[in-house]
Image: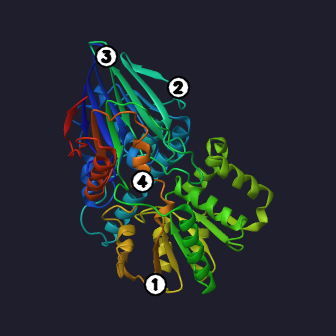
Amino acid sequence: MHIQFLGASQEVTGSKYLIRGKACGINHSFMVDYGMFQGGREADDKNLAELPIPPSELDFVVLTHAHIDHSGLLPRLCAQGFRGAIYCTPATAALLKIMLLDSAHLQEADYERAQRKRAQGRWKGDLPVPLYSTLEAIDCLAQLKTIPYHQRFTPGQGIEIQFLDAGHILGAAITIIDIQKENQQRHRTVFSGDLGMFERPLMNDPELIEHADTLIVESTYGDRFHRSLEDTEDELVEVITNTLKHNGNIIIPAFAVGRTQEIIFLLMDLVRRKHLPYLTIWVDSPMATSVTRLTEEYRSSLDEAAQAIYDWYQTNPNRLDLRFIADVEESKALNRIKGGAIIISASGMCEAGRIVHHLKWNLPHRNNAIIITGFQAQGTLGRRLVDQAKLVHLFGKEVAVKASIHTIGGLSAHADQAGLIRWLKGFKKPPSHVYITHGEPYAAEQLKAAIHTQLGWEHPHIPQSHSTYSL
């Protein structure tokens, strides 16, 4: 068996791993994740690139979780001829029904908007290329096959797979793949997927694993240490209190899946503990609204603290004003609010969606605050704000950045370096091969150094894109 790294190699998006070779003497080809690249024109070219083999030759796909950088190209894969099963957890399947349709809708809307502008003589260059249609996304969903955590399954002879809780978002899974070789020995490959933080609100802690022969581990925040939850809460309270005191708005770009729900629960808890006053919170993202409803359905899979906060809100709904916006006109009306509002909106990297409109209206005013709560990839608007840009281009116009920008890393759904090392300490002995992915070069290098110095593991490797290694 061989593994080829087709995405998330020295970058954070486009997770995509091709595994090919023999198990029990039978040839197999399958993918782990099939994610979309995000951030800039280079990502567009990568998303259009072909697989090394025809999609029709793939036996199955294993999906770690629903985030678009791990799942976003599945409809394209199916439309190009893949007919096998896509294995994932039940919560991941439920999220995909929301996220893949939303992804297709955004692509179609961008294309139609560009066509109208070209017809009016207001579009320069090539039109955007939709990667798939809404119908293709719907067709793709029919190939999902759900497997709960801890249940072993056999997608092909000589291959046994199991999902464990990654503690990242609903349904996110650490994936264990046991492959039986011709000599009857089993080779265990473990994909960390995206790992969540230990002892943080909403999700359970990532489950530990004792053994792997080959390990593929993420490194999104391999170079950073998040603030403690207490410090994170104190900073959030300070920013919100000061901004409301000066009658400003707080704008929070947030991923519709996971981050939005975590922020809602955290704000609820801060009000419950009287660290914050009565709040007016607007969640302006149809997908975030759907995912929040889904989170309620899966509340039994949340940690105990999150369930207690939810129960409190159910009995104290008047302690804060929480509203979910669906209608476009309602969304536009939020831009007339001059102060006192907390607006949570997608997308988390500020590249598309309603958040861009809210930034357009709120960035030019000094009394407002923008709270960045998640990773911002190179080339994204969110990254430019984090890097203290004084001017940004929105809808073809320059917009001055006068609002205060606050990066609160403690709210990340990704483990920091300490969290990653803590998870890696769960292995009783070092895996024979360790590949560090899903991180920008510096982050991956810093995690590599930490693994070597703190764990004593020899030769962890950072693979190049499209490189191939034996399992």
In the depicted structure, whether residue 404 falls above or below residue 34: below
Q: CA distance from mark 2 to mark 4?
A: 29 Å
Q: Nearer the viewer, mark 4 or mark 1?
A: 4
Residues at marks 3 and 4 touching, judged by CB atoms closer than 8 Å: no
Where's residue 324, x and y in %? 64, 62
Q: Which mark is residue 185?
A: 3
Identify the residue position indicated by label 2 in the image. 151
Q: Earlier in the sequence, mark 4 or mark 1?
A: 1
Label 2 SS: loop
Amino acid on which the number 4 mark rests in the picture? Ala
Q: Earlier in the sequence, mark 2 or mark 4?
A: 2
Q: CA distance from mark 3 to mark 1?
A: 63 Å
In the depicted structure, whether residue 80 falls above or below residue 343: above
Amino acid on which the number 2 mark rests in the picture? Gln
Q: Residue at point 41% right, 42% down?
A: 425
Q: CA distance from mark 3 to mark 4?
A: 34 Å
Amino acid on which the number 3 mark rests in the picture? Gln
